[in-house]
Amino acid sequence: MATFRFALNELPPEAEGLRAEVREFLRREVSGHGAKGRSDSWSRWDPEFSRKMGARGWIGMTWPKQYGGHEKSALERYVVLEEMLSAGAPVSFHWIADRQSGPLLLRFGTEVQRQRFLPAIARGELAFAIGMSEPDSGSDLASIRTRAEKVDGGYRVNGTKVWTSNAHRSQFLIALFRTRVVPDKKHEGLSQFLVDTKTPGITINPIIDLTGEHHFNEVVFQDAFVPEDMRVGEEGNGWRQVSTELAYERSGPERYLSSFALLRAAIADASKEPGERAAVTIGHLVAEMATLRQMSLSVAGMLQAGENPNLEAAVVKDVGTTFEQEVPEALHALLGLEPRIDTGSDLGQALGFVMQKAPSFSLRGGTREILRGIIARGLGLR
Amino acid sequence: MSTLLGDVVTRLFTDRVSKELIESAEKGAWPAALWREIEEGGLTMPLVPEARGGAGGTWLDAYAVIHAAGRHAVPLPVAETILAGWLLSRAGLDVPEGPLTIAPVHLDERVRLTPVGSRWRLDGTATRVPWGRDAGHVVVVAPSDAGTVIGLVAGNGATVITDRNLALEPRDTLTWSDAEAVAAATDLPADVAWRYGALVRAAQMAGGLESLLAQSVRYATERKQFGKAIGSFQVIQQNLALLAGHTAAAGMAAAHAFRCAERGDAWFDIAVAKTRVGEAAGLGAGIAHQTHGAIGFTYEHSLHFTTRRLWSWRAEFGGEGWWAAELGRSVARDGAEALWPKLTAR
Ligand SMILES: Cc1cc2nc3c(=O)[nH]c(=O)nc-3n(C[C@H](O)[C@H](O)[C@H](O)COP(=O)(O)OP(=O)(O)OC[C@H]3O[C@@H](n4cnc5c(N)ncnc54)[C@H](O)[C@@H]3O)c2cc1C
């Protein structure tokens, strides 16, 4: 049986020193937000907050200095991430660029692309969106059909991307297109591109989510021109690159902390001497969360050591999103509190917010079923 | 050192702990040869200083041994002996050879240790004592005004009423009246046996879950229905992925609690581990049995050596409901804002 390795990981002293600094910053920046606001950490758009983080050196932390990075360890970066998320800081503006677009460019981009984009990302000035999913291609990502045809000096793009988070307010997206149709070999002929969202021929249509919010979009390409020098990596290397990108996307602490602000509000609401049922519910959820933190830290340790934690990250995301979804359910069962939109108690609003967001936790970044398939492959079953 | 130790114990247990050995232990036989090998290998005293004849190791070394003992369903008081040796060392007492156990194992049971000159006298009754009948010596824990007293009494100093848990491991009632003991006061918490008992059971269960995962994956690739291995059915794959998640979580929670025990006060982490691992045990046993079909429900098959242990171990030294309640009360008492700093300081 192939198997997983979850080794205990320990943060180095410099990471713990950094933690105090981050907490001090957060005390000033986000202490006023209520539980509902703090529940919405990595989808809250706040360019000014991201610029402040950039000024602190907390974006692009591990990248080389020559690209505006700070050459810190992956574990120091981990501390910044978990502190931001646990505090419910509004990190959405820079999150995607810091987590996956930047690292992707660093690994596969040209020198010119790195010089142009990475320093601006690290300053917290450039936001990126992810153009992978299409109307007929969700879990089966390799089946995408949006075409990028070679023309003089670049590519002409036609097709539709969907669920593209923040496309309407990001300067760029990194998109996966089909540059060559290879019959019966859907993983071949895919390439990645840096696309300026203001390119003529691109229409961005809002999609309103079930809470009434606009954060994701449909992005339609009609003869949109993308210059040759905006291709990321070799033509045809897209599948390998996108797999790397998904690994970045899945390995962070955002996969278990989405409901933490709600849990914290529920603990605050319980008295110092909670009844038996409340105590059991809180204890059960805290035990799960404390365990997940150690698991997530273990994945961070593997990243730092240059190992490939794809399987372990899939396990943490599966267990983590299950926990995130359990929090509102368990608190509903315990409190019998009506979930609310924008009236009533802060706890009721946080409950209403997380309850409605919860279905997305096990969809975004790869569905639960797809992740379990990856885990099953790791077990040697496929 | 703990990785190396893990390899050593895994090799020993893989070689020696056969189905036949476990079955004969279930019928009441004491696997003396295996015990001798474990003891001679120095595996029973990782937490006893070298000056007292132990291995002078850490709690992570203890984890390696106890986890492997759980993984292989070793029908011997390995965890109890390790724990008892640690208690004696903390009390500055010598650790005798042979199997040891601890008593009482219930939070609300009390025995009395009374000083008589330079010796001590032990009175009282302890129920559900693991391997009570087999232990060469029993380490008793008694709260007193001078702190928690750790005592050592010979195994034959008690009257014994035998009983067992679901896995047919001895769980006996021991009664002492005016029994001779040596003892010393310590600064250990009064619930030390309960607390660290929960810790070692968490490690055993984490090992047991690994065994369930390995057995289930193997069976799923071997058993064929509808012309193919059942492991090729997506539902089976999804269930085993879920089992893998619980197994990983259990191992992490248990190992982390042992690391915290090495650092100092590990109450919080033990509560986390006993809760999380106990939950995983029930869910994991369910998935493993479902995957195995009827054959896994027979005494003939070896799956139940692990599942019956898990069902008992999760209840011993406080079930997950008890620990979750304690943990929840402690978190509520400290206040909501204290939780995150607490987690990151562990
Ligand atoms: C909030 C949110 C934000 C998102 N942001 C982005 C973004 O910025 N960019 C982007 O490109 N995409 C984004 N997505 C899309 C996301 O990646 C997809 O939702 C996801 O990949 C699943 O695709 P789908 O929704 O088409 O579902 P489908 O793939 O149609 O799946 C529907 C159901 O069928 C199951 N299923 C599918 N295939 C299998 C199989 N082989 N075996 C078993 N079950 C299967 C799935 O698990 C699921 O339960 C976002 C999604 C959400 C919810």
Image: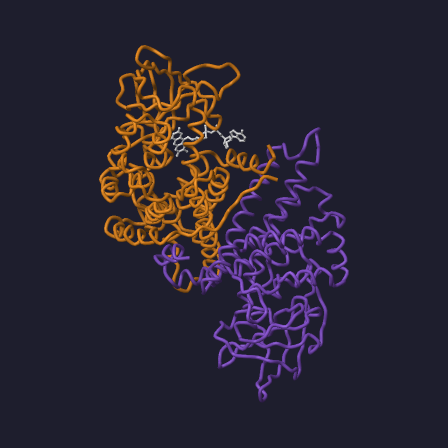
Residue B217: x, y in percent? 63, 40
Residue at the farthest bottom position:
B117
Describe the colour scheme in one phrase: by chain
Tell which of A295 and B285 is nearer to you: A295
Q: Quadrant of the C terminus of chain A?
A: top right
Q: Is residue A329 left or right of residue B2?
A: left
Residue B173: x, y in percent? 68, 72
- Identify the residue at horizontal 31%, vertical 44% (top origin): A342
Q: Quadrant of the N terminus of chain A?
A: top right
Chain A visual colour:
orange
A84 shown above or below A162: below
Residue at the farthest top position:
A152
A360 shown above or below A242: below
Tell which of B263 and B336 is nearer to you: B263
Give residue B137's quadrant in the image. Answer: bottom right
Q: How many marks?
A: 0
- Identify the residue at horizontal 43%, vertical 49% (top origin): A293
Tell which of A29 and B64 is nearer to you: B64
Q: Which chain is purple?
A: B
Give residue A52's quadrant in the image. Answer: top left
B191 shown above or below B115: above
Q: Is residue B327 left or right of residue B232?
A: left
- Identify the residue at horizontal 46%, vertical 33% (top origin): A366
Q: Is residue B104 left or right of residue A227?
A: right
Can residue A208 be seen at all in this image of the molecule? Answer: no
Residue B33: x, y in percent? 73, 61
Residue A250: x, y in percent? 43, 38
Residue at the farthest front position:
B51
Can residue A242 be seen at all in this image of the molecule? Answer: yes
- Identify the residue at horizontal 66%, vertical 63% (top origin): B40
Ligand 1 picture quarter? top left
